[in-house]
Image (cartoon, rainbow, N blue to C red):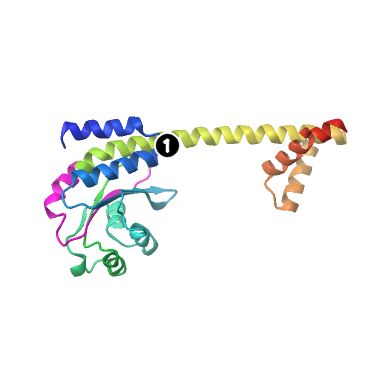
Amino acid sequence: MSSETSDTLDQAMVRSSGLDTLLRDLTDRAVQEVPGAVACSITVRRAGRLLTLAGSGGLPSGLDLRQYENGSGPCVDAAETGEEQYAPDLAAESRWPAYTEYALTTGVRCVLALPVAVEGDSGAAINFYGVGAKDLGTGREAARAFAARAADAIDMALRIESRRQSAADVRTALLSRSVIDQAVGILMARERIDARIALERLRRVSQNRNVKLRDLCGQLVAKVSAPDSRRQ
C-alpha cells in the first residue's frame, strides 16, 4: 500500500472519536482504494458474537447480518477460519446457498472476505463487495494490502476501546458502591441498626421487587435528597 494511503489511515485514527467512526473511515477508504469494490464492511467478534461494526456507503442492509444469523457466509468463514474467502460469481457459488440467494437479491455478485489478525478475541474480517461477476478479481492484491494495513488500525482501535470499557466498568462499580453505602447509611440512621442488617434489608427488598440493588439504593438516596424530604 502506498505511503499516502498509510498516512490517510493514520490521520483517520487521529480524527476518530471512537472505534465505530474509525472503522467507517476505513471502509469508505477501502472502496476508493480497491478496484471493483462498491461496498466494504468490517466484521469483529464482541462478547463471543460476530458483528458488523461499520460499513461503507452503499452496503446493502442486512447483507452481513444474514450470514451471522445463518452462521454461514464468506465473512463468517474468513473471521472464524482465518482463511481468505473469494466468490468471483455468487450465481455459480455453492458454499453458502442461503446467503448466496439473499446476496444476489441485493445486487451483489462478487465477494472477497479477508481475515484480520487482532489481539485478544479471535475473529475479524474485512469484506469487499462487487456488483458484477469477477469485479474484484483484479483488485485482490490491493484488497490484501489494504487489509494488512487496516489490521494495525483495527487492532489499535479495539485495544483502545477495551481500555475505555474497562475504565467505564470501574467507574460504574465505584458509583454503585457509593450509592449503596449511602442507602445503608440512611437505613442505619432511620432504623438505628448496624450496616450488616441494613444491607440485608436492602437486598431482601431488591429481590422481592425484582429491582437491581444499585437502582433500589439510588431511588432511596434520591428520595431522601429531594427538597421536600429535607424540609420534613
Confirm whether the magenta stretch covers residue 137: yes
Q: Quadrant of the C terminus?
A: top right
Locate residue 209, reporting x and y percent: 74, 52
Confirm whether the magenta stretch covers residue 126: yes
Identify residue type, mark 1: Glu
| Local SS, label 1 | helix
Image: 139 above or below 197? below
Mark 1 packing: few (<14 Cα in 10 Å), some, or many (20+)? Answer: some
Residue 145 lies left or right of residue 176; in this view the side is left
Q: Quadrant of the N terminus?
A: top left
Residue 117 lies left or right of residue 138; in this view the side is right
- Residue drawn at x 30%, y 36% as measured from the top left: 153
Residue 195 sits in which quadrant? top right
Nearest the camera: 215 or 110?
110
Residue 100 lies left or right of residue 224; in this view the side is left
Image: 11 above or below 120? above
Magenta stretch in the rendered image: 121-145
Res. 194 visible in picture: no
Locate residue 107, reporting x and y percent: 25, 63
Locate residue 186, reporting x and y percent: 80, 33
Residue that numbered label 1 is attached to: 161
